[in-house]
Image (cartoon, helix red, strand yellow):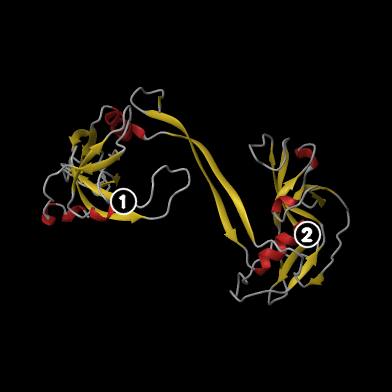
């Protein structure tokens, strides 16, 4: 992390990114496969309303609904917002409008984008039509965007079986969040302490509990914490779990142990990986200490100190 306007508070860019994989039920599978075939499907509820995008259960009665109908690729903008500066991976590279479009034959609106020369060309009630992508795979992006279209509404409700060749049965949706993170005064000091191979917490002036990592305030008493206290370095395993599933991009062989560790002098346990001991020998009460990699700014893991196990009564309040 790098310094911010205040030399004591850190800031750094942070990216949270993962692929979200999900399977599709019969209704969503038919809807996305239909988009691949340039067909928009909705589902009819018990009271006759047509929902686009379709869902598998009536939002009012919670009853399962499966009656699929084909609606028109034309519709009416119900509301909109102009986006003058598209961000990475948004549907269009140039400025566009986010729109809710009620397709002809549907009773609900579909969120998508409208390709328009400027906000003056967009208004609620305007008629639009789908512009299909050249290459379609069975995803909402098979609709490249909407574009200004026909002036008259065409209600086309055609029953549909939902049957297609090579149904889309699952999707992978990449999720990514880019932002600048600042840990604040208290955790900035904690991170700085780790760089010096020290673990620094903060003591509550009221209940005297030492929080590690510090939070800047006591969550129990609701008062600010400013008194810094060095704890550890050794501590006690209070609880733990054995991890048997290898995480993507994590260079740790399974099985391994992740534990809550109450550092000596701390008022609550922190998280840490246990190493230097077979996973099936880790136990509550095990005394451990931080193990640093060469040049590391934080402990690589915690390993046994060789001391006798701590008595349960010394850490039972920290479980």
**Residue 157 drawn at (x, y percent):** 82, 69
Q: Is residue 230 above or below residue 17?
A: above
Q: Residue at x 78, y 44 (%)?
A: 122
Q: Which residue is mark 2?
A: 103
**Count of residue discs:** 2
**Residue 181 drawn at (x, y percent):** 44, 35
- Foreground residue, 318 or 204? 318
- Foreground residue, 254 or 238? 254
**Residue 73 drawn at (x, y percent):** 82, 57
Q: Which residue is mark 1?
A: 257
Q: Residue at x 81, y 61 (%)?
A: 104
Q: Which quadrant, please, contains the N terminus?
A: top left
Please tell me how crowded label 1 is: few (under 14), some (14-19), or many (20+) other residues with Cα within 10 Å: many
Res. 52 visible in picture: no
- Foreground residue, 203 or 90? 90
Task: Tell me: 31 left or right of 235.
Answer: right
- Foreground residue, 51 or 229? 229
Q: Which quadrant, please, contains the C terminus?
A: bottom left
Q: Is residue 255 above or below residue 168?
A: above
Mark before the other along the chain sequence, 2 or 1: 2
Indicate the secondary structure of the residue bearing disc 2. strand
User: Image quadrant of residue 194?
Assistant: top left
Q: Residue at x 70, y 53 (%)?
A: 140
**From mark 2 to mark 1, how far is it between C-alphas?**
53 Å
Is mark 2 in CB contact (under 8 Å) with mark 1? no
**Residue 211 drawn at (x, y percent):** 24, 42
Q: Nearer the viewer, mark 2 or mark 1?
A: 1
User: Image quadrant of residue 281?
Assistant: bottom left
Res. 34 visible in picture: yes
Please tell me how crowded label 2 is: few (under 14), some (14-19), or many (20+) other residues with Cα within 10 Å: many
């Amino acid at each position: 992390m790098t310094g911010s306007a205040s030399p004591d508070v850190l800031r750094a860019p942070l990216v949270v990114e993962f692929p979200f994989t999900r399977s599709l039920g019969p209704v969503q599978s038919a809807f996305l496969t239909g988009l691949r075939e340039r067909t928009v499907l909705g589902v009819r509820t018990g009271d006759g309303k047509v929902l686009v995008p379709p869902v598998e259960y009536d939002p009012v009665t919670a009853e399962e609904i499966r009656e699929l109908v084909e609606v028109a690729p034309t519709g009416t903008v119900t509301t909109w917002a102009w986006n003058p500066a598209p961000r990475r991976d948004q549907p269009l590279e140039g400025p566009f409008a986010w729109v809710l479009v009620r397709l002809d034959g549907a009773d609900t609106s579909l969120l998508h984008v409208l390709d328009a020369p400027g906000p003056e060309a967009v208004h609620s009630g305007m008629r639009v039509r789908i512009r299909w992508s050249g290459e379609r795979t069975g995803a909402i992006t098979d609709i490249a965007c909407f574009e200004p279209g026909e002036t008259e509404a065409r209600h086309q409700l055609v029953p549909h079986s939902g049957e297609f060749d090579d149904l889309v049965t699952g999707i992978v949706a990449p999720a990514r969040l880019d932002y600048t993170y600042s840990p604040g005064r208290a955790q900035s000091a904690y991170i700085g302490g780790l760089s010096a191979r020290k673990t620094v917490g903060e003591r509550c002036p009221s209940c005297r509990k030492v929080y590690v990592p510090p939070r800047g305030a006591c969550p129990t008493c609701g008062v600010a914490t400013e008194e810094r206290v060095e704890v550890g370095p050794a501590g006690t395993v209070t609880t733990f779990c054995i991890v048997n599933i290898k995480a993507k991009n994590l260079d740790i062989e399974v099985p391994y142990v992740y534990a809550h560790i109450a550092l000596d002098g701390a008022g609550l346990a922190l998280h840490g990986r246990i190493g230097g001991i077979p996973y099936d020998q880790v136990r509550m009460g095990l005394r451990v200490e931080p193990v640093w990699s060469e040049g590391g700014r934080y402990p690589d893991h915690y390993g046994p100190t060789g001391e006798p196990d701590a008595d349960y009564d010394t850490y039972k309040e920290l479980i």
